Amino acid sequence: MRKMLVLGASGGMGYSIVNELVERGYHVRAFARNRERLEKLYKNRTDVELFTGDLLQFQDILEATKDVDIIFHAAGFPYVQWAEKLPVSTKNILEAAKQNGAKLAVVDNIYAYGRASGGKVTERKPKNPHTKKGKIRLQMEQMIKQSGVEYVIAHFPDFYGPNAENSVMHYFLENVMKNKKAIFVGDPTLKREYIFTPDGAKALVSLALTEKAYGQNWNIPGYGGITGEEIIRYVRHLTGYRQKVRTITKWKIKLLGLFDRNLREVVEMFYLYEQPIFLSGEKYERELGPLPKTPYEEGLKRTVEFMKKSGDES
């Protein structure tokens, strides 16, 4: 049986990738820093091997990648740590992949594309990032492409879904579930794109298992555009939430950022809430077939159910 390694297995996309691989019959090694978090997510799962380690420690990565066919890289760091930690962790992962003969499937965002110029963004769009974080992501992509490691890089819009706690959608849903005043980020009348993490996992795993997909970038869109007003309406229907939802604007984040370094790092990415990017999945569908796309109402229902269950167990 082929063995797969999922880095960032305690995060939103990592969790869905682990589940997708197990469903397809693979043995999975789930890697994260927090053992307690891994045990909570994968308790009583004999088909998931837990591995605690640090991406900044090469020996941890080298040990984790032994006997592994494909490394799924879904790990991340807080924005404030990107410049310091992403180059080191990427170098470690690539060197370990080379030494152990593993392929690499990377979960990436859309930051390196920069601003959209109208229409859906295809893989042919030149990477022209205008933000610090977009330039860092492009630097990581170039490291991967120059490494000699067989790779697949998948670009995704914002996540939502079971266990996707490091997301703007979770930020909104968390207070809804506690029946507290919730905050929605950005203009609620503007359509944006989100991807349900189980859909993203299905698409990435399919790419990673397809030989001709390697050496390429792939755009994986969500279920089209949706406004904040529509999301709020769906969530009210699903949960019975009746409190007023406030919106947070760029100037408010700038103000709060005077006292919070993490929020200061969010400001430069706010262009995505003013000029949303929509990805084209044409290349994927031409080469691999229909993309997995869960309607937003169903995806939000499953996300809310997971949050409710997690809250009941904590």
Image (tube, rainbow, N blue to C red):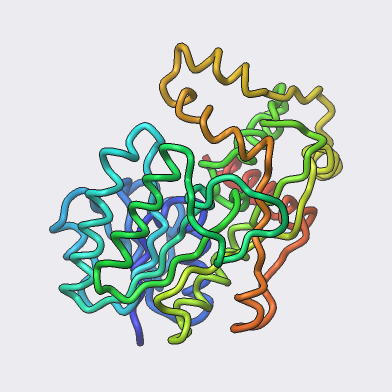
- Residue displayed at 43% across by 63% down: 44
Q: Residue at x 25, y 51 (%)?
A: 89
Q: Is residue 25 above or below residue 223?
A: below
Residue 81 percent across, percent down from the top left: 32, 36
Left or right, 255 with reference to 5:
right
Q: Is residue 259 above or below residue 88?
A: above
Q: What is the number of callouts on the image?
A: 0
Q: Please name whichever residue, 295 or 222, is drawn nearer the observer in this view of the structure.
A: 222
Viewer-proximal residue, 281 or 180? Answer: 281
Q: Residue 274's spot in the image, x, y percent?
A: 68, 35
Q: Is residue 152 left or right of residue 148?
A: right
| Pick the front one: 34 or 132 | 132
User: x, y percentage for residue 141?
Assistant: 37, 59
Please identify the quadrant where the N terminus is shown: bottom left
Q: Nearer the viewer, residue 6 or 240?
A: 6
Residue at 48%, 68% (x, y): give it.
217
Q: Position of residue 242 (x, y in %)?
A: 84, 28
Query: What is the quadrant of residue 276 in the picture?
Result: top right
Q: Quadrant of residue 247?
A: top right
Residue at 55 percent across and 13 percent down: it is 255
